[in-house]
Image: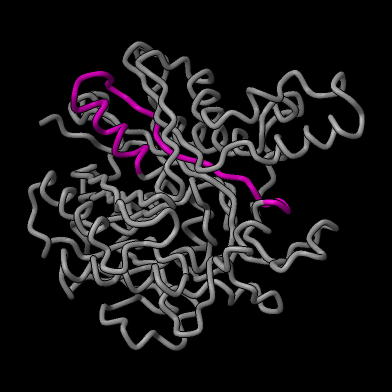
Amino acid sequence: MTEVVVTGLGATTPLGGDVASTWESLTAGKSGVGPLTQEWAAELPVRIAAQLAVEPSEVLPRVRLRRLDRSEQIALIAAKEAWDDAGIGDELDRERLGVVFGSGIGGATTLLDQDDILEEKGARRVSPFTVPMLMPNGPAAVVGLEFHAKAGVHAPTSACATSAEAISWAADMIRVGRADVVIAGGAEAVIAPLPIAGFASMKAMSTRNDDPQRASRPWDQDRDGFVMGEGGGSLILERRDRAEARGARIYAVVAGSGLTSDGYDIVQPDPDCAGGARAMQAAIKQAGIDPKEIGHVNAHATSTPVGDMAEVKGIKRVIGDHVVLAGTKSMTGHLLGGAGAVESIATIMAIVDGIIPPTINLDNPDPLLDLDVAANEARKVDLTAAMNTAFGFGGHNAAILFTKA
């Protein structure tokens, strides 16, 4: 089987405008969650979120900003960093370059903003870029056009599992011979009244408005829901023989992936994590390694009452009780469609640097938490294999297994 490796990383998150600053903040246990100071947030039941540390306007020219939804801006920034990091250059045949880039919700803010303009000012004032900005494949399309990708541009939309699925799809593109290099990832930017009100109405979000930095608390007995975040990540996946031939830096190997579905509920996770466990098993089987080799899981761990402990059951059943968990959403908030990519980057950096990021705010562990967690302090380790898991509304499950290069 063709071996797929990671040669470039890019991100913009609530913790930093690139991978280096995001990783530094993660390992330091810094929270990116803060109060929403916008006027529209004053009457919402949830008034906290993890907003970008660096605004796209500080990175992209004004003309581009006006023609791109915020999710597309994030996707472009992350993809450009990853591309530059990989150092691929212009010699690549663009018919061998693919893109798999997703968003869980897409251009919702564009849709809402343009609807306001339609109602207040009339149809003639609606932007001609409205449809390209709001379409769910917008982030993938923007990245594909930026780098002239011609092997195929794909846009998975599977809620919070989106960008983990994107990495799996991208690896498969290379393994079956459709592409030599694929830009994979995901982005999300829906910190706006309607999405927040909708999630809050479901009782899915933390209402710890008076203490935002301590609101996201995976596996803690006092957790009361997730904190919405915005941001995205991008990985450059490449055939190993090609990467080695050009002397590329190889961060890690995409050793295996698993994608399954629960068939259980549109919102609630399977309390036994049966589908998630099958995704983990599939990733391990494809990688052909012993589960005992997996020393770390960057877990989905959203800080919801049911989901956190269901996932622990699945991890323990499939991998064992030797593994050390991290819940990085305690710091980034939940990036929805961008979560899997950013957390895969954190998983890869844990292997590269030998550091498991802390899970902050884990002050009173749930009595059912029977796996080891790097609680409140980063932990130095020697990892040969680590996994990222991602689960989404609709019962989407993804597991990506990375091994040391």
Q: Quadrant of residue 121?
A: top right
Q: Is residue 132 left or right of residue 336?
A: right
Q: Is residue 117 left or right of residue 247?
A: right
Q: Residue furthest right?
A: 121
Check residue 239 for magenta coloring: no
Relative image position of residue 224 (x, y in whole percent): 54, 76
Highlighted magenta segment, given as a residue range: 165-194
Looking at the image, residue 293 lies above or below residue 79 = below
Q: Residue at x 42, y 22 (%)?
A: 153
Looking at the image, residue 185 lies above or below residue 96 = below
Q: Nearer the viewer, residue 217 or 26?
A: 217
Looking at the image, residue 255 lies above or below residue 111 = below
Relative image position of residue 223 (x, y in whole percent): 50, 78
Q: Is residue 122 left or right of residue 57?
A: right
Q: Residue at x 53, y 54 (%)?
A: 21
Q: Quadrant of the N terminus?
A: top left
Relative image position of residue 82 (x, y in whole percent): 45, 36
Q: Nearer the viewer, residue 200 or 287?
A: 200
Q: Quadrant of the C terminus?
A: top left
Q: Residue at x 29, y 71 (%)?
A: 312
Q: Residue at x 50, y 43 (%)?
A: 104
Number of labels in the image equals 0
Relative image position of residue 316 (x, y in whole percent): 20, 71
Q: Nearer the viewer, residue 350 or 247?
A: 350
Check residue 170 for magenta coloring: yes
